[in-house]
Image (tube, rainbow, N blue to C red):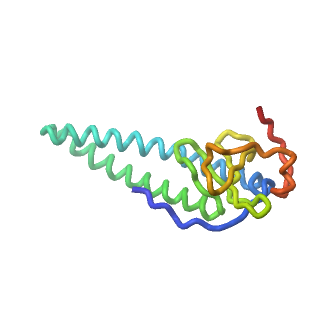
Amino acid sequence: MIDTPTKTERIFSVTQANATLPLVKSIVKDIVELSQQVFQTRRRLDYLAANRAKGLEYYDEELVEMTRQVEEDEQRLSDLISEINQLGVEVANMTGGEVEFPSMRGNEPVYLYWQLNDHEVCWWYPANSDKSERRPVESSILDEFGSGSNCELN
């Protein structure tokens, strides 16, 4: 199982969040790929274990090797999440490549939201809600976040 590392409290402006994206994108890409790989390997392990329970012991060597590999992958995934958290960024969805940057809108705590393949941070939502309530970072509120943006929103 993957442990959730302690989060570092940092408050980001849109500019600061966007400035971290080259590194964040690289780490998040690895998290997405590795989390999908771990998920698939775990499914395969469940299948092999079920067949082993039926007396098909020719899967023993594969089970041992796959178990060792998935444990290594889970540790690497935990390390990647720690790396993101040390930047002050929170992983919202490993397989979806979604991260959140703690921010403030006036006196209101919010999250700036970014997803893998977005060019920059273009969304935010109140910290006391969830990402389904995210709103575009529009020019009218950029001053509250301390930055400008080149987001193209539909």
| Residue sitting at x 12%, y 39% | 55
Identify the residue at the far top of this view.
Answer: 154
Image-quadrant location for residue 103: bottom right
In this rendered view, identify the residue nearer to me: 65 or 25: 25
Q: Position of residue 117 (x, y in %)?
A: 67, 39
In this rendered view, identify the residue nearer to me: 70 or 109: 109
Image-quadrant location for residue 108: bottom right
In this rendered view, identify the residue nearer to me: 81 or 93: 93
Tally of marks: 0
Determine whether 85 is above or below 39 in the image: below
| Residue sitting at x 37%, y 50% | 69
Identify the residue at the far left of this view.
Answer: 55
In this rendered view, identify the residue nearer to me: 78 or 127: 127
- Image-based side of 29 in relation to 43, left or right: right
- Image-based side of 62 in relation to 31, left or right: left
Q: Position of residue 113 (x, y in %)?
A: 68, 49
Determine whether 57 is above or below 5 in the image: above
- Image-based side of 24 in relation to 69, left or right: right
Image-quadrant location for residue 13: bottom right
Q: Position of residue 29 (x, y in %)?
A: 59, 45
On-image quarter of the C terminus? top right
| Residue sitting at x 59%, y 44% | 97
Q: Position of residue 35 (x, y in %)?
A: 48, 46
On-image quarter of the N terminus? bottom left
